[in-house]
Image (cartoon, rainbow, N blue to C red):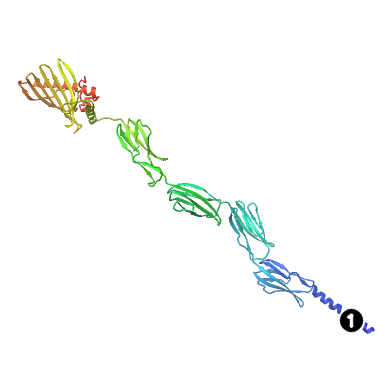
Amino acid sequence: MKQFRKWIQLLVVMAAVMMMGLNAHAAAKINKTSAILIKGQKLTLKIKGTKKKVKWTSSKPKIAAVSSKGTVKAKAKGSTVIKAKVGKKTFKCKIKVETPKLNKTSGVFTAGYKYKLKVKGTTQKVTWKSSDKTIVVVSKSGVIRGKKAGEATVTAKIGKKAYKCAITIEQPSISNESLSLFKGNNWRLEMNGTVRDALWWSEDESIATVDEGLVTAVGVGSTRIIAQVGNTYTYPCTVNVSNPVQAVSLDRTDITLTEGETYTLSASYSPADAQGDKTVHWSSSDETVAKVGSSGKVTARKAGTARITAQIGSKAASCIVRVVKYEPNMKDYYARVISYLQTKGKTNGSGAHFIEASETISGRTVTYAVLYAGTAHQLSLTMTSTSDSAKTGLTMMVNVLESAYVDPAFTIVYTSSNSGFQSKARIEASNYTGEDNVEFELVKAQKMTPSDSFIQSTSNSELKKAFTGWAALLSGRIGVPIQNLGFYAYSGAVA
């Protein structure tokens, strides 16, 4: 019985020892059996429930190495197994090394535009945060949305590891939302509020083209120029192109006219293919000086200065017209005399136009006349002097249309009863004073032999009398002094 008790005690002791060994192995435990690390991160593994020495090893040290104290350092993307050997027992921890990367580290976006940021290369939870929510907000899944222009940083955090993206939010605007251009003109559009280059295009290049914002109007009509900034937003500008008259010009910008003269101005416009009303409207700044008609014909009216303007639409051009006083020349005065004779004179049996005046001198009837024979283009000045006993006649013929130089020839016929003589002379009109004695030549005599002194005295006396009468008739009836007909030096009586 005593022996049996000893065996029972031995069995109990052995069982206790065995149970202690089993409890010791069952209590040892590794703190992690798996872990995900980011390259560069460290993790300390521990074996709990034992005081024995632990031997640490990595199946792939190039992916993750482990120190003798169980500190694991992630070195490269991949997977490895960290082993902890305690006595004959081995504990394992599966390590996965990730190399996360943010898909964008900086970006420029338009306010209101959404964009999803992503952290690639990780299966771990990512938390997102914006440094300024008034500029940009970010959702739990990494979707950002710009709220107003400015700069902010969006951070993606994996554990203690942070990945940052510098965000710039813009609010672009186009410099002009509408334009009105003339065909052929240019205008440069700008995109404001952005540092990004815009993509430009025209919806109808037959009306307007665009090259990096430079708009060129090429045809009449309306189209839109589009600017695109980024991938989504477009900014249109409506362009209306017309082709009116853009400039008016005149063939002359300065002319000088004499009173009574005319000149027809010619107006032109550009561009040559202009559309719309191209009627030229003419006007004068002073119609008392120069008047202009609807065809551009300018008539000088009195001395002075006027501005003639040609206007098409809102475009105009001007010409300064200087009018100088009319100073008639000899031909003008002869023309005035002839015009008077033709319009206010009488007509004789030969068709000549004339005016005349008579007076009585010492019992003789003296008649002065100015005649114009249109067929012969001759102006004649005549005088007849008659009495009961004698008759004297004098005729001066002037060719007024061939030359302004007057070289009149005089023929005096003196008769008394049945006898008499005819004499003639020629003078230079510009030198005749009216007091000179002209040398007369005897042409013929009838029933008398007149002395030279009688011929000269009688002929010169009649000549002076004739000039006095002609001067009075021309000046008094027509308003033309005889001096203006070439007799510059004449100073005889005008009556």
Choose between 276 and 417: the one closer to the eye.
276
> Percent position (x, y) of residue 245?
40, 44
Three-letter amino acid code of the residue under disc 1? Leu
Quadrant, the C terminus: top left
Q: Is residue 70 left or right of residue 8?
A: left
Any part of residue 142 in sight: yes
Quadrant for residue 42, please give it: bottom right
> Percent position (x, y) of residue 88?
76, 78
Q: Is residue 48 left or right of residue 433?
A: right
> Percent position (x, y) of residue 232?
56, 56
Q: Is residue 226 above or below residue 282?
A: below
Choose between 471 and 268: the one closer to the eye.
268
State the residue at coordinates (93%, 82%).
5
Q: Is residue 96 above or below residue 274?
A: below
Quadrant, the N terminus: bottom right
Q: Is residue 40 above or below residue 387?
A: below
State the residue at coordinates (92%, 83%).
4
Any part of residue 176 in sight: no
Choose between 96 and 281: the one closer to the eye.
281
Q: Is residue 126 left or right of residue 469?
A: right
Instruction: Identify the residue at the far top of this view.
Output: 363
Instruction: Identify the residue at the far front of this view.
Output: 349
Choose between 343 and 326: the one closer to the eye.
343
Label 1 belongs to which residue?
A: 10
> Percent position (x, y) of residue 94?
70, 71
Quadrant for residue 143, please give it: bottom right
